[in-house]
Image (cartoon, rainbow, N blue to C red):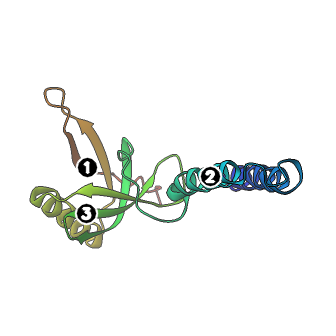
Amino acid sequence: MTIQIIILVFFLSSIYALFIYRLIKVNQFNRPILSILSILLVFVVVHFVFHNNMGYPINNDLPSTFKLLHFHKSKNKIIMLVTNDDENAPRLHRLDYNLELEELLMEAIDDQRAGKLLLGVMKKNRSNGVPSITFREIKRNLPTK
């Protein structure tokens, strides 16, 4: 992931340098408005590309299975910090506020504080496509003495 970000930053910096070179040397200010607008467009695209990597909550669907680390109610949104089974890094997800969802998450956090290992499962309802979240307890496999 880090290597991909470094490659992307290098690639975008090269494009930016090319735009500046064309603005100063090649165009010699014959059409500076067009060049400046193209540079502005690149920066707007870069902002939207990097927005998901800057620590802000994303609006994408939750992973099919996840572990809930924390959640926070903010105005009309619920922000959840979850880890995917495939990745070690936690990720913030933003969902629309729902009272039932908040109660489910509170119950899951309370169960985790009580020492239970929970796994969140995301299922989409076939009839209306609305996702539903359920938590199931993971049994611990302890070694024999």
Mark 2 crowdedness (10 Å alpha carbons): few <14, some 14-19, many ≥20: few
Marks 3, 2: nearer the viewer: 2
Rounded to the nearest whole Å, what is the CA distance between mark 3 and mark 2? 37 Å
Circle 1 — which element?
A: strand
Q: Residue at x 70, y 56 (%)?
A: 2
Of 23 and 90, which appears nearest the observer?
A: 23
- Give the amino acid type for the residue marked by disc 3 in the picture: Ile
Marks 2, 1: nearer the viewer: 2
Q: Which mark is residue 136?
A: 1
Which of the marked residues, 2 or 1, is nearer the chain's N terminus? 2
Residue furthest top as drawn: 127
Marks 1, 3: nearer the viewer: 3
- Give the amino acid type for the residue marked by disc 2 in the picture: Leu
Left or right relative to 18: residue 116: left
Q: Which residue is mark 2?
A: 37
Q: Position of residue 140 (x, y in %)?
A: 38, 55
Q: Are marks 1 and 3 in contact (CB under 8 Å)?
A: no
Q: Residue at x 87, y 48 (%)?
A: 26
- Give the amino acid type for the residue marked by disc 1 in the picture: Arg
Q: Residue at x 14, y 31 (%)?
A: 128
Q: Which residue is mark 3?
A: 78
Q: Residue at x 76, y 54 (%)?
A: 16
